[in-house]
Image: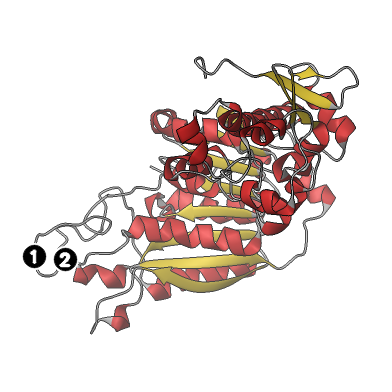
Amino acid sequence: MEENAKCNGVVDGYFDLSKKVIEFDPPLYKQRYHFVKDLVNRHNTKKVADLGCGDNTLLWMLKIHSRAELLVGVDINESRLRYSWDKLSPSWGNHLSPRDLDLTVTLYVGSAVERDSRLRGFDLITCIELIEHLNSEDLARFPEVVFGYFSPTMIVISTPNSEFNPLFPLDNALRDLDHKFEWNRMQFQTWALDVANRYNYSVEFTGVGEPPAGAENVGYCTQIGIFWKNEAKATESCISEQDGEHAYKLLYTVLYPSLQQEKVRKFVVLNEVYREVYIMRRRFIRILIPMDDSEFNNSEDSDASETEFKDRFVGPPAFTEAQKAEFRLLGPAFTEAEKTEFVLLGPAFTEAEKTNIVNSPKPFCVGNEFCVPLERLLAYPKVNRICDNIEMLRTYIADTVTLSSDGSTMKVEIPDHDDY
């Protein structure tokens, strides 16, 4: 049973059985996963495989890592993989805010002691609470496969520290009925140093799950070995020696949307363009709506005549510096409700971004059409990040939006006030 169990026994849960129960906060399984996540973040690992991935919680945590390009989970329990693969599927939010780099997530059914060439050359392979589930025969094969054949740059192995067990009210000598053994620190370190020496790795030891006060001598509840490959890079001949060896069954694979993909870039640009045009048009309509005398007298522009107020929006408006400061991104001051809506519709801009937007060509009205110059849209940082120039922006939106005859302006209708 090669899986990362969350609550297999008293160690990972919160049980009020006796005064000897130790409560870990956060729970021990989360501490193990966060340990790996922090390691991945520190070293910017791109390709990670989790052997004995269980319910895929670790992969789920790692998929938000911006530099990750390939995440692979392997487990012998196919039904559990099927039950939990949904958490690895891209969400709608992944499409609205896609990654910068491609990320592929793949699940295989297979054993950690089977060779599969698709797991060769990874940056990191994790074996979280795995080796204690292996019988003596599989444990003997484990180093040959993981260290010798897969040969990743880094390997993380965690396993229970049996010296901690007397602190638990265990009915069994082992923490889980499926455990074949549990090592003390000397046993684990002896095994790890021998494996590291055989396969040209260095190893350092640490752990998670601090012991309670007065019991510091037992060490961490979970002991961890971090193995680093001494060679800078495996030779090409070694990597391709048995290139076609596929022992694992492919169960699931998905490619996350990213800005490396043309259709995703187009979707993001269109979404951002529509959103910003909607915001600008809405503010315009607020000002263009006819006001009675009392509304006008209470408006923020009460010093100006109503004619002057409306004339400001006949053709491209010319804003004074004071008006720019007041309207910022084109529009009067927000109500509290509108401030909340703006937070939901788009991010706050830096002062430099605001200045760039304000200094770009202004939107204007022609008849019942609201017109936004493409230069204005290109000034918005999310659009500008994807589109290098006006021509690229025009290419992404031309077949979806209405453009002016010269292609320099996007046009949308101004709805009737009653409809709006």
Q: Is residue 80 left or right of 167 when viewed as pictured?
A: right
Q: Which mark is residue 333?
A: none
Q: Where does the image place residue 191, in percent across and percent down from the top left?
A: 49, 68
* For the residues bearing labels 1 and 2, Cβ distance under 8 angstroms: yes
**Which quadrant does the N terminus fall into?**
top left
Q: Is residue 78 above or below residue 337?
A: above
Total marks in image = 2
Q: Residues within 10 Å of mark 1 (few under 14, many from 20)?
A: few
Seen in the image, is 117 located left or right of residue 92? Answer: right
In the foreground, 74 or 14:
14
Reply above or below: 324 against 337. Answer: below
- Work out whether residue 402 can be spotted: yes
Residue drawn at x 21%, y 61% is: 173
Helix, strand or loop for disc 1 = loop
Asked whether the viewer can see residue 110, the reply is no
Res. 416 image quadrant: top right
262 or 325, which is in the foreground? 325
| Residue at the left extreme, as displayed | 18
**Vertical placement of 359 versus 232: above or below?**
above
Percent coordinates x, y for residue 72 in the rendering: 58, 41
State the separation of the CA atoms marked 1 and 2.
6 Å
| Mark 1 residue type | Ser
Residue at left offset 59%, top offset 52%: 146
Pick whichever, 310 or 180, lies toward us.
Answer: 310
Which amino acid, mark 2?
A: Val
Q: Is disc 2 surrounded by few (<14), some (14 to 19) or many (20+) residues within 10 Å?
A: some
Q: Is residue 136 left or right of residue 307?
A: left
Residue 21 is tagged as: 2
Q: Position of residue 249 (x, y in %)?
A: 56, 28
Q: Residue at label 1?
A: 18
